[in-house]
Amino acid sequence: MTANGDLSAREILERLVDAPEILLAHCKICDPYDLMNQLTQAFDLKDISPDHLLRIMQSGEEAIEPDLADFFRYWRPTGYSIKNGAINWRLILGELPFAPFYDEQIANAVNRSLLATLLNPRISLKYILSFISQYSNEIQGRYQSDSMTPAGFIFHCSRCGSTLVSNSMAATQLFTVISEASVLTDLLLDTQLSDQHKIAALKWLIPMLGDRLIVKLNAWDISFLPLIHQAFPDAKILFLTRRPEEVLRSHQRSVGIHMVPGHQIAEVFGHSISVSLLDYQAEVMMWIYARMLEQYKVLPASSAAMVDYRDLDLDNMCHIAVFFGGHMNQLKKSAVSAIMQRYSKSTDDLYKDRRAVPESTDRFVISERIQSQLTTLYRALRSESRLMEDCEN
């Protein structure tokens, strides 16, 4: 048997990760040196000092290859490194706390445990996919069965109430809602991955995030809808739109990263600044609107719905829940009503409905060509907007 002192940092991390139940028993220890002492004893690391173990856990740069048979039962994906083609993981104790975005949920959960803060193993996607290709029937049924098909996906043009919708769906407690998870977006953005590998990764990764799952993606992820539909052809797709001038005004107040030319995300759109920043942002809007309209038209009518920001009232939130397969009652409707009174991205603050506020008189200097095309695309999308079936009483 190898002496502890001869173990590499990678082997020590793999030993820790392969014993999640032992780790969970130490999740509530708050003192780092007490934690390291107890871990060295629990894992029989006699020749490893607490300081050395702490340094190993904090490094976390090298990808490890643990036993994955039970790994996914305990660990949650928290990020994807395009540079390394690897997924980062955290050991989360209990359910994720509510927050408008998945990364925020993870951060809040990690902050509750020193162990979760320190231990952030990285596993290459290639290693995971190799393991998945050799799944036993039992494991395959657990993560890729028909019962694990997501309830649906939300695609949007940004600043159009998508977070309000995802928060409302979470408030029903009928669904697990994952909102704008960086691990999904960054995986999709990895140009080194083939479409086949992306689809294989989605088929495994998304179902493990929760049952009756609704996934809200980022605005630019609309380009990957065909891959997502191939992975989950039976999942519902909701598109959310808003008047382009309102979206652009919102980005003037606080610009989104996909509206910044030169950002990595901008490569998805293939545009460059030709006249002005505002023209560039309007062209990005055109690109998103065009992709939404294109994808909406090719999806089965029963699988897709289009809703505009102006129509996001309580009744339509109920319609959306039913569209995703939920069964609403008055209690759940009251829960949705309560969440709608709060600002969607900071639920501690009361919401101010801007739809009733007169439009700003600030001039938008957008070229006539872009303005005309943008308006035409939005009108085409708006014409497709429709209310869904009535919710239950």
Image (tube, rainbow, N blue to C red):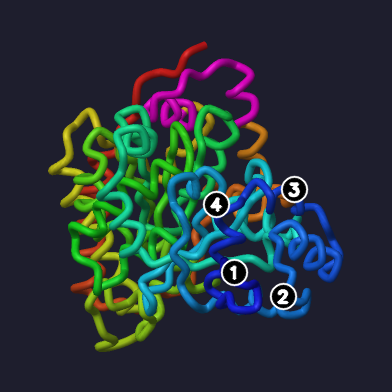
Q: Residues within 10 Å of mark 3 (few under 14, many from 20)?
A: few
Rounded to the nearest whole Å, what is the CA distance between mark 1 and mark 4? 17 Å
Rounded to the nearest whole Å, what is the CA distance between mark 1 and mark 2? 10 Å
Give the residues drawn in magenta, as a range.
Answer: 316-336
Mark 4, residue position: 75
Q: Nearer the viewer, residue 91 or 277?
A: 91
Q: Is residue 267 above or below residue 41?
A: below
Mark 3, residue position: 25
User: Is residue 332 rendered magenta in the image?
Assistant: yes
Query: At 64% across and 65% down in the image, what residue appears?
Result: 119
Q: Secondary structure at mark 1?
A: helix
Rounded to the nearest whole Å, what is the CA distance between mark 3 and mark 2? 20 Å
Q: Position of residue 269 (x, y in %)?
A: 25, 72
Report the amino acid beneath label 2. Ile
Q: Position of residue 231 (x, y in %)?
A: 24, 45
Q: Earlier in the sequence, mark 4 or mark 2?
A: 2
Report the amino acid beneath label 3. Ala
Q: Quadrant of residue 98?
A: top right
Q: What label sits on residue 12 in the rendered view?
A: 1
Q: Secondary structure at mark 3?
A: loop
Q: What label sits on residue 48 in the rendered view?
A: 2
Report whether 156 appears left or right of 251: left
Q: Earlier in the sequence, mark 1 or mark 4?
A: 1
Rounded to the nearest whole Å, what is the CA distance between mark 1 and mark 3? 18 Å
Q: Secondary structure at mark 4?
A: strand
Mark 3 or 2, closer to the camera = 2
